[in-house]
Amino acid sequence: MSHIIVIRRYRPGDELGCREIINETIMFIFFGMPFTICFFVIPIVVIVTYIATYLAFMLVVSEINQEISNIPRIYMSNAFSCFWVAESFEPLLMTRNPKDIYYTVMNEKQFRESNIDVSSQAKKIVGTIGLLKSHKVAKGAWIKRLCVHKNYQQKGVGSCLLSTAVQFAIDEGYSCADLIFTEYNENYRKLYNKKGFELKQMYHKPIIGPIVSVLIYELSYQIKPEHEYVGNNGKRNIFRTE
């Protein structure tokens, strides 16, 4: 088994890999917007719009980088929040594109029990996700920073990351787990629907005043008795399977 991806908890030293993945996703949200959005106005406004969009992007990146630098304090300092990464193990000399390779995705416990020797393989963070206590909903959780490198999408990485976060919310007794995504992250919509997330609300978030806005979807996973059972390990587990 030469190509595996392990979902594990964040460790000190993961900051650089997390920053690269998350910033790449934020860049897509801003600059993945249809460029035709700019062509309904005269060229000078197009230039102003582009500059303003770039400045807004840089501001968001700065805020996110500050968050990433403080992952230990924000996500790992108590029992009710956590941050996970998806880490790939690959041969040092790999000539094929990851898009064309099948990866076995497993959690940290499965990886330890497998006793797979990865001492001679290269490691790379290819995905992230975090969970915090919500300040909007009583006993609610907030899922953030679900990001998967474009070369490792459609391989079950995002699904495993999301399942890990939802299971954590269930184990910690949260009543629900909420998240948001934009109209430019449509590739995640099917995943969220498949995992049982339902639309809570949708709204437009201004990016450059009234000129440019982004449609935001807020989804919620309701943790109810019929969605869980008590396993042999004494922990609550997701009842719904795929």
Image (cartoon, helix red, strand yellow):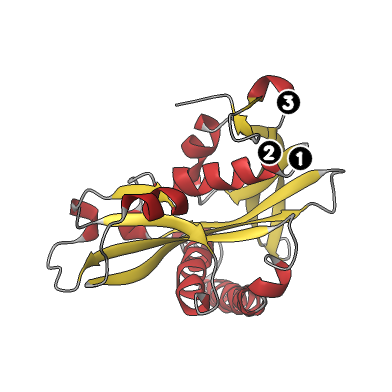
Q: Mark 2 = which residue? A: 170
Write down the quadrant of residue 79 in the picture: bottom right
Q: Residue at x 85, y 49 (%)?
A: 136
What SS does tag 3 mark? loop
Q: Earlier in the sequence, mark 3 or mark 1?
A: 1
From the image, tell me which residue sits under label 1: 173
Give the residue pinned by disc 3.
224
Where is residue 196 shown, x and y percent of the image? Answer: 58, 30
Residue 9 in view of the camera: yes
Looking at the image, the residue that sits furthest to the top is: 226
- Hey, which quadrant is residue 123 in on the image? bottom left
Task: Please tell me in which quadrant of the rendered image residue 74 appears.
Answer: bottom right
* Left or right: 7 in relation to 179: left
**Quick one: quadrant of the C terminus?**
top left
Query: Residues under labels 2 and 1: Cα distance?
Result: 5 Å
Residue type (three-letter) at the residue carrying disc 3: Lys
The residue type indicated by label 1 comes to: Gly
Q: Mark 2 is on which residue type? A: Ile
Q: Residue at x 55, y 24 (%)?
A: 240
Q: What SS does tag 1 mark?
A: loop
